[in-house]
Image (cartoon, rainbow, N blue to C red):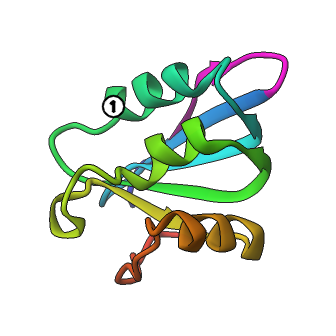
Amino acid sequence: MSVVEERLLYQDRQLTITVRVAPGPPSVSLVGEIDASNSSAVAGALASCRQGGSVVVDTGRLGFVDVSGLRVLAMPGVPPSQRWIHLRNVTPYQRRLLLMMGWYHEQRPHHLPA
């Protein structure tokens, strides 16, 4: 039986970030809004759970994300094959913004425990 640990990484008035650690890459959930006031904290929180590999980030419960947040999540300065943040549950709105910025790329699916 595998142990699944869920812990709070960050929280402010706009955003809650939790990580679920189980076998495989850490799974991070973002709930709320990301903008210039908290995008640096998001970057730090994601980096803190990386552990040398990739991190799967669920963006399905983000109500708003600005360009500073998109930069953190999309890693546009890094070639797609070297990006360690892998987005999951990207909303149509988020996908549209990423396409408009030229930062969207298809990612292979990650199989995570339920």
Coordinates of residue 35 in the picture (x, y in percent): 69, 31
Q: Is residue 10 magenta?
A: yes
The residue that appears at 39% across and 61% down in the rendered structure is 1
Coordinates of residue 107 in the picture (x, y in percent): 38, 79
In screen coordinates, is 114 left or right of 109?
right
Q: Which image quadrant: the C terminus? A: bottom right
Which residues lie in the magenta part? 4-14
The residue that appears at 44% across and 65% down in the rendered structure is 103
Counting every numbered tag in the picture gives 1
Coordinates of residue 29 in the picture (x, y in percent): 62, 47
The residue that appears at 35% across and 83% down in the rendered structure is 108
Q: Which image quarter: residue 32? A: top right
Q: Is residue 82 above or below residue 41?
A: below
Q: Residues within 10 Å of mark 1 (few under 14, many from 20)?
A: some
Q: Secondary structure at mark 1?
A: helix
Q: Can I make out residue 17 in this image?
A: yes
Q: Is residue 111 above or below residue 24?
A: below
The residue that appears at 17% across and 69% down in the rendered structure is 81
Q: Can I make out residue 90 in this image?
A: no
